[in-house]
Amino acid sequence: LLDNEVCSAISNSCSMNNFTSNAAGSVSTPYGIYLQSNASALSSTTPLLNADFSTSNRALSWSPDGRFLIAANTSTVFLLEYNRITNTLTQVDSVSHQSRVAEWSPNGAFVAIGTQLGATDDNSLIVYRIDYNAKKFTNKSTLLVGTAVTALSWHPSQNYILYSFLDGVNSARINLVRFNAGTGTLGALLQSVNSGLLRIIKDLSWTPDGRYFASAWSI
């Protein structure tokens, strides 16, 4: 946080109403990213920036150093650079993907994206290396998945990625794949767990020591 900040957060338009949010969560701007600081209460905040997008946002993820923000919607994954001095977000690159989830790697060198079948994508797990100097997505590595990727999580070591999807019999499956940080490529499938239940996994999260993970489900 800056010296004069009480709270700093990133929020999508679903929790904002024009320039203030309220407990009811009403909203007048359909799609956007709101950068907030100096929040005096959870029910009232003042956004410093509103970055509008043409379709609904599905995922947000900060780089570990706070310099970049990934914003994924139903057609595009944006790479945005944040300037803390001027409190501005600037789009510096984008890639066309119908993405449900996106997450930075622990060291900030890579971004993992989960996609769904559409005009620009198969159902895939995709990893890009981020060129900090050129401010671009580079070195794409793709792993085809049976259906849309619904959640993903980097292992703290950065050597593995968990991802989830619905398999052919409509039950949720969680896969663990190896990732080679040296080459920036996805590797072999190491383990696969089938729940046997009709559920959609919405989120996956490793413990800090990488020994366990948690999953959040919905019907």
Image (cartoon, rainbow, N blue to C red):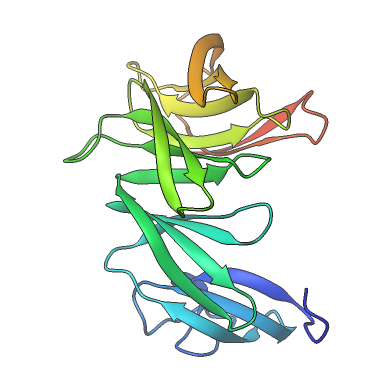
In this view, the residue in front, 56 or 158, is: 158
- Locate residue 126, reporting x and y percent: 41, 32
For this orientation, the residue located farthest to the front is 133
Percent position of residue 15, x then y: 52, 74
The residue located at (33%, 20%) in the rendering is 146
**Which residue shows up at 62% across the image and 23% down it?**
160
| Picture quarter with the N terminus | bottom right
Residue 51 is left or right of residue 116, and the answer is right
Q: Is residue 33 visible?
A: yes
Query: Relative to residue 163, is residue 76 depicted above or below?
Result: below
Q: Is residue 52 above or below residue 208?
A: below
Q: Nearer the viewer, residue 20 or 108?
A: 108
Q: Is residue 116 above or below residue 167?
A: below
Residue appearing at x 38%, y 19% in the figure: 167
Residue 128 drawn at (x, y percent): 45, 37
Judge whether residue 21 can be spotted in this image: no
The spot of residue 117 in percent (x, y) is 24, 34
Q: Identify the residue shown where x is 52% and y is 79%.
A: 88
Front residue of this view, candidates 147 and 33: 33
The image quarter containing residue 110 is top right
Q: Residue furthest left?
A: 119
